[in-house]
Image (cartoon, coloured by chain):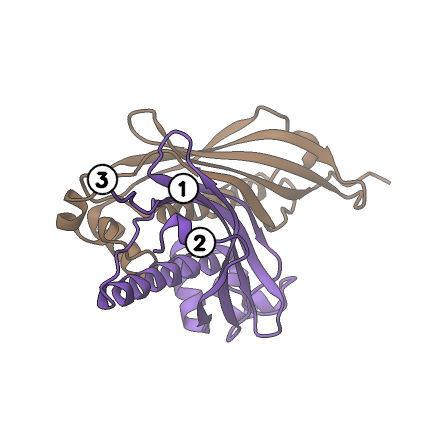
Chain colours: A brown, B purple
Amino acid sequence: MKYFEDITVGERAVVGRHTFRADEIKAFATRFDPQPFHVDETAAAGSHFGALVASGWHTAVIWMRMTVEQRRRSTEAARARGEPVAAIGPALGLRELRWFKPVYVDDTVEYASEIIETRASESRPNLGLLTILSTGTNQHGEPVISFISTTFVERRPVKE
Amino acid sequence: MKYFEDITVGERAVVGRHTFRADEIKAFATRFDPQPFHVDETAAAGSHFGALVASGWHTAVIWMRMTVEQRRRSTEAARARGEPVAAIGPALGLRELRWFKPVYVDDTVEYASEIIETRASESRPNLGLLTILSTGTNQHGEPVISFISTTFVERRPVKE
């Protein structure tokens, strides 16, 4: 992760892309969200969705995986360049999680994150607070998911 | 589901209980949240958590599964009694998702839902809106997760 000082409001990055295949949609939902329209094509065809759709939680956790993988890549790249890497805190929660549209079989979702606020921590002078808008958009350019999270990130160490 | 008219603010129901085993924590996180403190005991011991902890998303999706299972049981029970069953809409999102405390290996989380607001839909006279506070509490009585969701539920049909 970059240091707090190097992050500006409006910065947007694509985190990754994922295509939701039928087998994976059903496997996830069988374990975690076994509603008929997530696990069975025939039942889904008769539902208000008209076809099999991914659990909204599935579209959320794929964002999580993409985010972990992207941070890992960016950390490794910084280390390879011999640059220091700022620590980022764990998420303490999120707000305004919205599922706008269903994700159908073979839809590809592009996940992106945008910095919408930066703020120095008053209680912890070595940390800054980032407010991040995360979105997932399908191959038709339609938003399917979004949410807002806040996380701590390290400030650039003061040189003595 | 009960009809909108039969649901009152303050109603609280235990949705289910789940014990998070090490194998399951690691299997979920390997697929969806591969941060070291979710997938590797040794790395977790050296992290600020001090031991392996479940992904926050894992504690959320287990809530989803418990909720689907509980609705299924209550629908089957109502049908067995010959009672009509009100339809409930899909979740369009949620707000204020918070992870208060880590969930460690062998912690048991009790999930509960409480109705915090009921409101007739102005645009759709056959539907009511429920605002629900969902919580997960560990075996020490400490909250580990909570969030608020809003969902449509059918109103009791008007007798002609």
Please give the residue where the numbered disc 1 appears in the rendered image: B128
Q: Position of residue A67 (x, y in %)?
A: 47, 43
Residue at the spot of label 3 = A48
Q: Nearer the viewer, residue B116 or A4?
A: B116
Q: Earlier in the sequence, mark 2 or mark 1?
A: 2
Residues under numbered marks 2 and 1 in contact, where contact means CB atoms less than 8 Å apart: yes
- Image quarter where the N terminus of chain A lies is top right
Name the element at disc 3: loop
Q: Are the residues under marks 3 and 2 on the same chain?
A: no
Q: Chain of mark 2?
A: B
Asked if the residues shown at circle 3 and circle 1 are in contact, with their CB atoms under 8 angstroms apart, the answer is no
In the rendering, which numbered label is found on residue A5? none
The residue located at (22%, 64%) in the rendering is B82
Q: Residue at x 36, y 51 (%)?
A: B3
Q: Is residue A85 visible?
A: no
For label 2, the crowd category at 10 Å Cα-Cα, with few meaning under 14, some 14 to 19 and many 20 or more, is: some
Identify residue for label 2: B7
Q: Residues within 10 Å of mark 1 (few under 14, many from 20)?
A: many
Q: Quadrant of residue A9?
A: top right
- Residue A27 quadrant: bottom left
* Kind of residue sitting beneath label 1: Gly
Q: Amino acid at mark 2?
A: Ile
Q: Residue at x 40, y 69 (%)?
A: B24
Tell me how far mark 3 sits from mark 2, CA to CA: 25 Å
SS at badge 1: strand
